[in-house]
Image (spheres, rainbow, N blue to C red):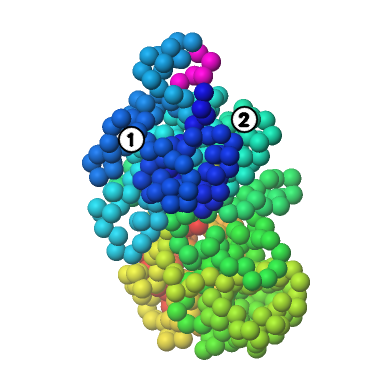
Amino acid sequence: MTKRALISVSNKDGILEFAKELVALGYEILSTGGTKKMLQDNAVAVTAVDEVTKFPEILDGRVKTLNPMIHGGLLGKFDDASHQAQMNEHGIEPIEIVCVNLYPFVETISKPNVTWEDAIENIDIGGPTMLRSAAKNHQYVTVIVDSNDYANVLEELKANGATTIKTRRKLAAKVFRHTAAYDSYISNYLTEEAFPESLTLTYELKQNLRYGENPHQQAAFYQKRLGSDFSLAYATQLHGKELSYNNIQDGNAALQIVKEFDMPAAVAVKHMNPCGVGTGDTLEAAFDKAYEADPTSIFGGIIALNGEVDAATAEKLSHIFLEIIIAPAFAQEALDILTQKKNIRLLTIPFEQVNQDQFNVVSVEGGLLVQEPDRYGFGDAEIKVVTDREPTAEEWEALKLGWSVVKHVKSNAIVVTDAHMTLGVGAGQMNRVGAAKIAFEQAGEKAQGAALASDAFFPMSDTVEAAAAAGITAIIQPGGSIKDQDSIDKANEYGIAMVFTGVRHFKH
């Protein structure tokens, strides 16, 4: 009995060589459409699927393989007498190998100005059906959806005349992952509800990591195929060691902060909290401020900058032990300086493509939490000056900077700033006064005349009392406590200008 292989692929990389090898091994090739033409044009003998089905392609090619002559050949058990009798009765021959990949739906919807009609026409029906049929019957059928598997299949066929059950099961599992992902892209494209009754997320493996948060934890990094290019998942690494799990977490935190700024800005991050944020007329000046904010904690940190790194900035960066530097670009002179440090990771990301994911997704034991990102910025706030004194022009700039940073600091969060840099950061404390004390201690004498930003309201006036003792002259906070008036009265007592935004910035 002639062995048969069905080949129908949109991605034709390597398929000609694969088909020729199968013919040499005695396989009859069944094919359709563009794949059939390509093989025939290259002198590969091909049997058209409609010769097997005795039924022409119809409905502009929408129906061609949905036929018992095909699916009977894919689903029939080769060693089951009843199956074989039914197949013989209807003239159905088994198909031992299926090599199919699908219409380029994701590539189509990724194009600018794609029409709804083009998207719908690129939803494959016959392909997934054949793949699922073959994968279900992997006890007998070898099914291939990935060109990277051609070589291993051929190697086993040449060595043993057949693939192993272990290989067929592995390939079948890959098929079901592939079709599940394909369906999720389609369903997400068609879904209009913000939170539908079921949620299917698809990520593709970018790389296996050496370990996770700690060396005894395994980890990997997955990326969204339709994600934002403004992401660590799509960064270009120019130099240095592979990224670690913690590097990726910290790098993402730095990116989320630095994208808040239109002016030249530099952000230093440790353990997903900013240890220094600076702005200036130049990137070098911004980095000077970020470094000055906390020259101790920046050691071993991650730096994100929102402009091209020049030689002067690179020279300063090179004098510090840093894990990662992220920027939209590095001048060649900067690269010459920084690549002298063997292990430092240099990453570029297209800042002109800054946008935000539709959702934040966080895993919990047995489930996922899904929410919209916190896009609320200073420009969105309904600013209300609640004290007798209004902030000065310089205090307003400090308040804006503090409010842009505090939303990225773990709650309870207090950030002390002047007009150009963070002076103290109190992160992740169990009470707000504790967070404030940490920020004031870090700021030291620089807290005199500085501004304070709080991610949430003050439940009592003790934080204002502590701020006054540290020399703070302006405060920005959401407001909304039943004891707001106590804080307002205390601010007035000390001549502190206080601003309410109406919106909190919890970050857990």
Which of the 4 image quarters holds residue 331? bottom right
SS at circle 2: loop
Q: Nearer the viewer, residue 350 or 375?
A: 350
Q: In the image, is 193 to the left or to the right of 376?
A: left
Which residue occupies 36% across, 18% down?
A: 90
| Left or right placement of residue 18 versus residue 188 in this view | right
> In the rendering, at what x and y percent does residue 232 appear?
56, 62
Residue 473: x %, y % from top left: 50, 79
Q: CA distance from mark 2 to mark 1?
A: 27 Å
**Number of disc labels:** 2
Classify 10 Å Cα crowding around label 1: few (below 14), some (14-19), many (20 and above).
some
* Magenta highlight range: 76-80
Numbered circle sitting on residue 285: none
Magenta-drawn stretch, dominant element (helix, strand or loop): loop
Q: Which x, y percent locates residue 269?
A: 62, 67
The answer to whether 385 is drawn above or below residue 130 in the figure is below
Q: Is residue 77 magenta?
A: yes
In this rendered view, identify the residue nearer to me: 488 or 124. 124
Residue 465 is one of the magenta-drawn residues: no
Q: Mark 1 — residue?
A: 50
- Binning the other alpha carbons within 10 Å of mark 2 as few (below 14), some (14 to 19) or many (20 upward) gives some
Q: Which residue is at a point 30% across and 60% down the rendered structure image?
A: 114
Q: Residue type at mark 2: give it.
A: Ala
Kindly identify which residue carries mark 2.
162
Question: Where on the picture, by quarter, is residue 26?
Answer: top right
The reply to whether discs 2 and 1 touch (Cβ–Cβ < 8 Å) is: no
Q: Name the mark nearer the viewer: 2 or 1.
A: 1
**Amino acid on which the number 1 mark rests in the picture:** Asp
